[in-house]
């Protein structure tokens, strides 16, 4: 037992003599797990009634013979050409109203009965054939669910989904506020998917009716979940035990992963950060992925060992970065470290995507050497981290509904982006060394001392009460501008802003000013001044203490940041678009109150994270994201599990893991 | 009698208990006029043969009971969902050739017989029901007419419109110059709307054939006028007297408002400037709107009391700005000051649009206080300004045909925008305090000393002779680059540029140079140097005096600005894209000649405007658009009608109105 | 006999009285050749069975009567409106899947049987009528072939083209690498044109499958060639001798002009450079056009005498520029200098395009004076240059397949553009005065000392061997990053990069780094440092000498530029995106080795070019592209054929031509 290591492997693309070379190199690199079959539908079902598993059999047997384990995909991430020809309705109709023809991948209409029947059918046959095979350790359904379809089949399914949700047109008309612009629906069939041909202009974020657009986002996420469920049920018909997953995409807007949580046996995700300055962003994504199933460890299903291909510019991962980021995944809860891809394909749009083995099949490349070194390290570490959990006392609320509602809103500012706000607050927590659970708004909050809810636009399901509960028992709640604005239907509360949060926060907001990104209003807090941008709410304290005030414009001197004492705790409201240092100041103040600053809080670019093993050992991960060596503070030293040596300094991109067994006592480990 | 005050009111969106709160607040704010029913078609006609006026009745009765007056909309700015379902052809087909389905507003094909019949039908029923109601002071047809449709019904209607215009295909082929690119039409049915699927690329401004595109713009404007006429006729069938209007949009390119003038009983318009530095632009729009019906006062039908929602960034109107801009409207001819909206709706795309009353229904907000203060001021002022006219001796020609022709032209420069040129000349006149009528090219010019015609691309209808007449009798004509280029069909004159204007201007232009916006050619006039950009015509004096010369490039030293003596007057030609200070110099020289400089010509940001009441009193409006107080010159002091006090200084965003009764003599008032 | 002078003439657009004025002015300007009929299909065939050649007859007779010669167009560059009405399938379906309706030009589906039949039909009738007419010196088929169509007729034709190419689906699936993303085709009819509706996103360069997109580019180029062949065959049925051409567009990506070479009797092209700093770019285009038919002289079919109209900004050609660029064309192989257009049309989208005669019909304009002066100069020069050839010892390989493959590739960088790389190397050769043949990769290389192959992405047809042959016999080969990457099907070689070029170059490349345009890595060569950008290949010398090394990043100190000794010659590899000065350094080193530096190699902006007449005389053209006068070196002086005087200095935009008869000996002429 150890952290799984390997990745996507598509030997159906090359001749069998190459397979031998592959496995020889896999052995050298300590590869133990292969994801197989991700795009094999046309291979395994070359016609409507024709099946051919011979190649897949051979791939699996060859891997099993080498002792490797397999994550087996159903292969439905792209449908075969013959299916689109026979049933054109399996393709998608895009936001512009254009029916697509055969091409690309992730190309199936989620509402198509033919697609649903055929995708479940191939999954069922796969499961019937391979269930119980000793090498198979997981099922991988579809691939990177996403996109959207706007066809008439989806329109009909949307109407069914709406009937289920609203029962009556009266309720729907009320929810969507259809008295506006003469939009009252008098028949379900009058409802069209919100697209460029109906309610939208300037793209998917500009809609005349937020209600219908929000519901379509929910519906489409649910429709694809139905596709996943179809296949999982088909698998379960033959294989009742092997865990089933699909690869998520981290901070991906179109799918509400929280609505999928119950259906996955474990979470896995693909980590393709936009650039090499994404350490904080990746930490957020890991914490979000871990939070989907309440802290259960996840798989890092894909990462590139070197370069991507799909970007306009595809830089190399610098030496050591692939290792650093792999350990970051483990630090945040990964029990598997997998690559896309094991060997580079020769053709089509991913031929220049990085791979463990390149076109020339060499072992003497920098990339293969780094992969091998990490393989060796993982092999040496063994089972230590498996099943370990993050002992977070801080929660950050992440809410797809708020994300959607905020970004499809007309006003106050298109420049305010949900992820920017969330990222700023998570980055502060991360940099200061607090372990953070990123959780849905429906989660229990009892275990947390601090709950941060940036841009919590929508309040639903008794959330206001639960947040109040956190403060009442002595905890701290932090929220920001654009929170507490709308109910579940995206209708403004007929009350002071921030709606149901007002009592907790002890403020009201009558006005908000939005400005271009170049405009700065300085905010003074605790004697220091911080820049703020984009959005400036004019906060009127109704019991709260004013912590920060604006320095400019006609509202100079009025409240920008407040803190309300509520029960034994605090509730902060940040009404201004503070720059990172201002956010850091607020978050540091809060963490200090609760004694939650990490041991490297004063070392920028040094990340710490704690996992607690099933045995109760605390593992402290220390990661140096900078290009310079850093001296670690006393709390972060000891014997590094990776090198087996005492470590007091981390080199550029360096990693260390320290273990503290509770029985032994180990004062040098802080955090959590 | 006083300036009407109020705005759009949509209580059908909220429960009746809120209505009471609304009217209580209206009373507090001196609200006397409500625009009702703008988007109520689905409410009043919930099915093809079903009508329900109960809610509208209640709204009207409640308002009437409070003594308020009503501008009653027919509600056809958006059609009901059931209509689109039953008759899909009532929706529009866009420039990209896509038939839309139900959604948004301003969504009806203007050529659809069903839409024409149904919209007239609901207007007829409304008129039959409410004609003669004492509260109703105006009818509001449709809403913000605009956009375009390219469906087959419009294609057929376009062909009919062309038959009417050209009678024969020979005439049409000649007008459109179809020998070019093998385009000769041999059957009317061969003609397609000019769109992305036919003559256009890179959007609506790039066409292979200017002739067809120009005619389609004219046709579409006329088609929507037909929609207005349909409804007005229906109203007139029951209500022969109440004035009928629709809300225009100021500087809006798609509709040639001059072609609509005769059909409106009075002009009204919605003022949503792009930013808070738009004082000059709004002045131009007001002058244009007033000029549509020959100087008759208009209504400011909509303005936001605080913020918009539809912009990417929606800043607050600063304190005092709403009042300042309201008085600017009055200064330029408004007899009504109305808001969108009286109370904020809770849902859909305008829920964050500013309103007199917010979601919380509070009176103790900054916005409500400012609205109330202005209401009080208007109430105190009473009838003084009603019906007053602007005594302009300067005319600025504004021509949709030239706007269209110039901006759909291939060559010489896409960077030259009609509004930029017009705005620069109007801004100079405005800043220097000249009252200006912005009028169509068909208007009589007899009453003006100065006629400014920026970028008068198209010459038609004997305009050259009428302009010559202005100069002949001692007046001054000013025109610019890209004037006198094409005839009514957008065909170049087979003659020297500027075509029929050449004799008046005493020049010819063989060549013109266009450059990127970063390139500057300095122009020297009267010993000073001014920057010019974008377009540089090489002007050859043929009798005219050279006033300005280029300073750079191979044409350095040649004429850029000329003045021709013609009759007892002058005719200026500005061949270079002068920056604002150069335009100011030309305009100041001209105004000085005619003694038309205003009393605050040397105070930037201080606007003056004169209105003459039916009794012959002159009202001088002085508005300070700056954030600093200004001392007024002696000619602009006296007793301010708004405060009742003598005023010598205007604070930031300050306004004063001085009255001069001709009988009394009042030397301190200048202007006009 | 002399260089033909004149251009496109469309008198069918104006009344006959103007024709007389035209010809009077043509006489004055020494115009001897007119291109007639380019867009006359609707004129000559006003209905399906109606023909009317009367106007064309009159135009031709009037020109012939004046002694002028005619390049007669078939007029099929745009189809008539009646044809589109009767057969909607003759219009194109665009990349977005939208069937167009009648409009614009270059608007015919190349696969439409109706279009093919009708276009050949009108060409046949034209040829039958005018074959043998003494005035007609060339046929001009269609106009500026280009664009693309994605309709179902093209889909069917594409499948036929694929059957021809691959014979079996197995071969096609292998070529397109369809095991990737489940794309195996099991029936030819499953194949759809690669468009926004199938394999593409973000436009024509982003495809999921490079194989299908590459083949569609090849197919579309061939489909339009078929259209040309249709008409040429029709012409040949009546006129077996008059040469047939069509006007190419220089550096135009959609058409692989090399595949058209055999079908044209001579090459002609339209030169519309993007700006007035395009001297090097135009030289490349001329060299490419001359290389299409193995160095045979070409016609400059179109250039503007003054301005374009289709650009956003259309600057004037400065005085002397039109003359300079005309002589540049001759210096690179033109035997005709023609304008678009002889007289400006009054309407539609080219009414502001520059013309020899403007709307006013004046002779006293700057443009007409310059045209007349050049006409006089060409007249005086007489036949000297006709048929002369360029004695190049340097070849630059230009390959549409590499262009396409590189720019449709996902990874490594969308910022690397084929033309940028090619232009940089050609610019270096041009500035250093080497005469260059720009030739296809299939051309024989025996006659060249130096072969430069920038970004030679695709290697096919034994090219690696032929390049090796150049080095083996003592020549020099220069190639760059992104060369040797893929085979004819765009599949990566299963070998070290640069594939088959590795032995010749003595290197291998395991990794490549791409960075944003703002990032610079300095490369040191021969003691100097040069900037490099965008792409940085990590070159591992396998026998080659390291000439340049990176200065930064983790690969600092490793090889960026190498030179391998191979046989008696050299093979250079430039792995970094060197800025122009670095490219210049490499190219100067290579040219120096072979004694090929031109006489003005050290004079930036002075271009030299040599042509050798059929009699063996060497003509040295010297062109000063700067705004300052330059003193010529001794090797570039003598008696200028244009002025008839000795010339030692060239003024701004100046041109001189020196002749050296081999019999006489003339040491002062270098080059070639």
Image: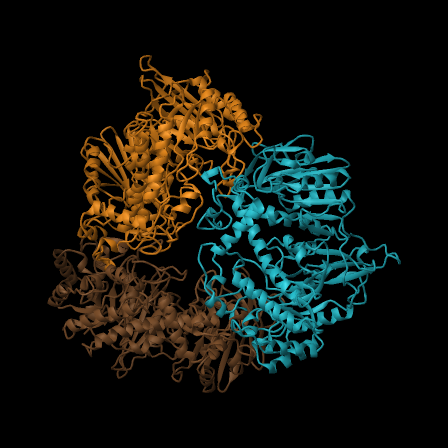
Chain colours: A orange, B brown, C cyan
Q: What residue lies at 43% left-to-right and 74% top-to-bottom?
A: B188
- Given residues C80 and A313, the one toward you in this image is C80
In the rendered image, the vertical position of residue C362 relative to residue A41, given as above or below: below
In the rendered image, the vertical position of residue C133 relative to residue A3, given as above or below: below
Residue A558 appears anywhere in the view = no
- Given residues A28 and C619, the one toward you in this image is A28
Tell me residue C254's x, y (percent).
57, 54
Q: Please state, as top left, top right, bottom left or bottom right, where the N terminus of chain C lies in the image.
A: bottom right
In screen coordinates, is B134 left or right of A104? left
- Given residues A456 and C23, the one toward you in this image is C23
In screen coordinates, is C5 left or right of A267? right
Q: Residue furthest left?
A: B65
Tell me residue C10's x, y (percent).
60, 73
Tell me residue A524's x, y (percent).
33, 42
Q: Residue furthest right?
A: C664
The image quarter in which residue C550 lies: top right
Could you tell me how many numbered marks the image carries? Answer: 0
In the rendered image, the vertical position of residue C293 relative to residue A449, given as above or below: below
- Given residues C394 and C328, the one toward you in this image is C394
Tell me residue C449's x, y (percent).
76, 45
Q: Residue furthest front?
A: A49
Q: Residue furthest top?
A: A664
Residue B473 appears anywhere in the view = yes
């Amino acid at each position: 037992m150890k952290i799984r290591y390997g990745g996507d492997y598509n030997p159906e693309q090359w001749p069998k003599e190459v397979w031998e070379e592959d496995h020889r190199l896999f052995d050298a690199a300590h590869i133990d797990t292969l994801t197989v079959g991700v795009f094999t539908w046309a291979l395994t079902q070359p016609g409507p009634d024709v099946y051919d598993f011979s190649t897949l059999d051979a791939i699996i047997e060859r891997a099993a013979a080498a002792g490797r384990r397999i994550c087996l995909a159903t292969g439905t991430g792209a449908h075969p050409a013959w299916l689109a020809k026979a049933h054109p309705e399996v393709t998608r109709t895009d936001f512009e109203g254009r029916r697509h023809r055969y091409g690309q991948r992730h190309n199936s209409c989620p509402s198509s009965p033919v697609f649903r029947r055929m995708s479940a059918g191939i999954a069922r046959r796969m499961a019937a054939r391979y269930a119980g095979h000793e090498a198979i350790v997981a099922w991988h359904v579809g691939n990177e669910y996403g996109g959207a379809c706007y066809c008439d089949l989806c329109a009909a399914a949307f109407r069914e989904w709406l009937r289920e949700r609203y029962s009556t047109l009266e309720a729907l008309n009320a929810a969507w506020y259809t008295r506006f612009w003469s939009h009252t629906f008098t028949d379900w069939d009058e409802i069209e998917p919100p697209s460029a041909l109906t309610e939208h202009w300037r793209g998917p974020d500009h809609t005349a009716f937020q209600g219908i657009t929000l519901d379509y986002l929910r519906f489409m996420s649910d429709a694809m979940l139905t596709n996943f469920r179809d296949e999982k049920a088909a698998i379960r018909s033959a294989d009742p035990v092997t865990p089933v997953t699909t690869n998520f995409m981290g901070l991906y807007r179109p799918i509400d992963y929280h609505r999928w949580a119950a259906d996955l046996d474990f979470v896995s995700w693909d980590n393709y950060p936009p650039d090499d300055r994404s350490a904080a962003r990746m930490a957020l994504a890991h914490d979000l992925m871990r939070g989907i199933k309440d802290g259960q460890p996840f798989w890092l299903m894909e990462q590139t060992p070197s370069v991507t291909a799909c970007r306009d510019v595809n830089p190399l991962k610098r030496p050591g970065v692939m290792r650093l980021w792999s350990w970051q995944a483990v630090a945040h809860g990964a029990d598997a470290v997998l690559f896309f891809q094991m060997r580079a394909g020769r053709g089509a749009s991913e031929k220049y995507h990085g791979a463990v083995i390149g076109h020339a099949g060499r072992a003497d490349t920098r990339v293969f050497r780094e992969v091998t070194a990490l393989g060796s390290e993982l092999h040496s570490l063994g089972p230590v981290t498996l099943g370990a959990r993050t002992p977070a006392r801080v929660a950050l609320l992440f809410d797809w509904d708020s994300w959607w509602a905020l970004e499809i809103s007309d006003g106050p500012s298109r420049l305010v982006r949900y992820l920017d706000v969330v990222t700023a607050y998570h980055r502060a927590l991360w940099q200061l060394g607090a372990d953070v659970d990123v959780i849905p708004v429906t989660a229990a909050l009892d275990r947390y001392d601090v709950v941060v809810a940036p841009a919590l636009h929508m309040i639903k399901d008794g959330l206001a009460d639960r947040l109040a509960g956190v403060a009442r028992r002595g905890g701290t709640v932090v929220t920001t501008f654009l929170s507490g604005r709308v109910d579940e239907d995206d209708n403004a509360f007929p009350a002071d802003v921030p709606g149901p949060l007002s009592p907790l926060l002890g403020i009201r907001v009558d006005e908000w000013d939005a400005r271009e990104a170049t405009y700065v209003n300085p905010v003074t807090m605790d004697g220091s001044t911080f820049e703020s941008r984009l959005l400036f709410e004019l906060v009127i304290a109704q019991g709260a203490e004013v912590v920060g005030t604006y320095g400019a414009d006609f509202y100079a001197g009025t409240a920008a940041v407040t803190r309300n004492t509520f029960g034994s705790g605090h509730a902060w409201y940040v009404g201004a678009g503070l720059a990172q240092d201002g956010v850091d100041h607020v978050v540091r103040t809060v963490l200090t109150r609760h004694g939650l600053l990490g041991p490297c809080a004063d070392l920028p670019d040094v990340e710490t994270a704690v996992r607690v093993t099933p045995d109760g050992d605390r593992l402290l991960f220390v990661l140096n994201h900078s290009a310079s060596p850093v001296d670690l503070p006393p709390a972060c030293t000891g014997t590094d599990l990776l090198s087996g040596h005492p470590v007091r300094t981390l080199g550029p991109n360096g990693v260390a893991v320290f273990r503290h067994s509770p029985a032994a006592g180990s004062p040098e480990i802080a955090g959590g």
